[in-house]
Structures are given as structure tokens and as C-alpha cells.
Image: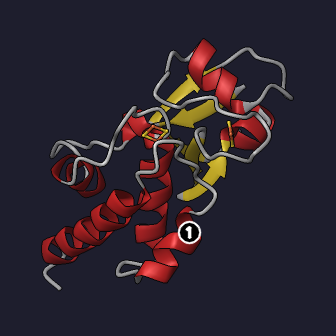
Amino acid sequence: MKLKVNGSEVEVTSEADTPLLWVLRDELQLVGTKYGCGIAQCGACTVHMDGRAIRSCVTPVAAAENREIQTIEGQAGEQGLSAVQRAWLETDVAQCGYCQSGQIMAASALLAENPRPNDAEIDAAMSGNICRCGTYPRIRKAVHLAAKWMSEERGA
Ligand code: FES
Ligand code: FES
């Protein structure tokens, strides 16, 4: 089956019901997307499908056919790191780092939909992304910073 991942068309041979997470990690070697729980409860496996955050551990690869998939490896563009990634670095969000690719993918999907979220909206959007290191206050700060930079870049 053919998939579009990070802007490139790729062919994969996994069974149709294989979770997208394992196709990304094992077949395509995109190991930035992490396995946490496997039951849509932690957010470590978050990627974008057509711009929306999804849990790749419970999404069969067949559901991703003909859809635009973006992983953490596709966040940076020709201009370098995304505003969300830069804000994460500036704010020193990561502790152990395990949950952070999922956090960044969730945050960037939020900002695409809601360019200036308030604290409550950030908490609501990110509540399914668990961080055992408790980086939530820095995540919130980084989302605000990314929102500010993105609005400046748009000239708003
Ligand atoms: S690994 Fe997918 S939500 Fe936990
Ligand atoms: S930074 Fe360690 S789990 Fe989130």
C-alpha cells in the first residue's frame, strides 16, 4: 500500500490492520514517534493525519492510505526547525524526552486550529498527552511562545 509520509510517497508491505505506529517505526525507521501504552491513553505515538493529531498506536495503516501523514521527523521544513520545536528548545521543555515528540505533534495540531490558545484551551488540547516527568508548565509556556512567534511570522 502507498502512504504519503512527511511529503514523500512511500510503499509499505505491512498487513492492513498493522498499527500505523509500527509501520512508521519498523518499516520506515521513523523512530521519533514513540510507543507508550498502545491503547490510545498516553499520546506518545501522536502524529498528524491530514493535519489532525491522531494516536498512531490504534490507527490501522489502511486508514492512513491516501492521507497526509506527518511525524516529528517532518516538523522541520526548509527554513529549519518549526516554531513549536524552537519554542520547546527555548523553554527547555524536555526532561527525559520520551513523551516530547507526541507533545510537539499535539501542540502543532492545536496551533494550526487555534493560533492563540489560552491556558485552558492548551490544557484541554494537551490533556491526552501524558508526561511522567511533569513538564506540563513548560509545555504550556512553550505553546504560548510558539503562538507568539507564529503570529509575528504571519505579520499579525
Ligand atoms: S502509545 Fe499510543 S497513545 Fe500511548
Ligand atoms: S519528558 Fe519525560 S515523560 Fe515527558
Give residue 56's position: percent from left, percent from top. 67, 39
Using the rendered view, name the quadrant where residue 6 is placed. Answer: top left
As rendered, which of 98 and 55 lies closer to the eye? 98
> In this orientation, which residue lies closer to the viewer: 44 or 20?
44
Quadrant where the image shows the N terminus: top right
**Residue depicted at x 84% and y 27%:** 16
The quarter in which the C terminus is drawn is bottom left
Callout 1 crowding tier (Cα within 10 Å): few <14, some 14–19, many ≥20? some
For the residue labelled by badge 1, is the local secondary structure a helix, a strand or a loop? helix
* Residue carrying label 1: 125
Taking the spot 21% from the left edge, 46% from the top edge, the residue there is 89
Counting from the top left corner in percent of width and height, residue 80 is at 17, 42
Q: Amino acid at mark 1?
A: Ala
Check the image and report above or below for 142 versus 10: below
Q: Nearer the viewer, residue 75 or 105?
A: 105
121 w.r.t. 92: above or below: below
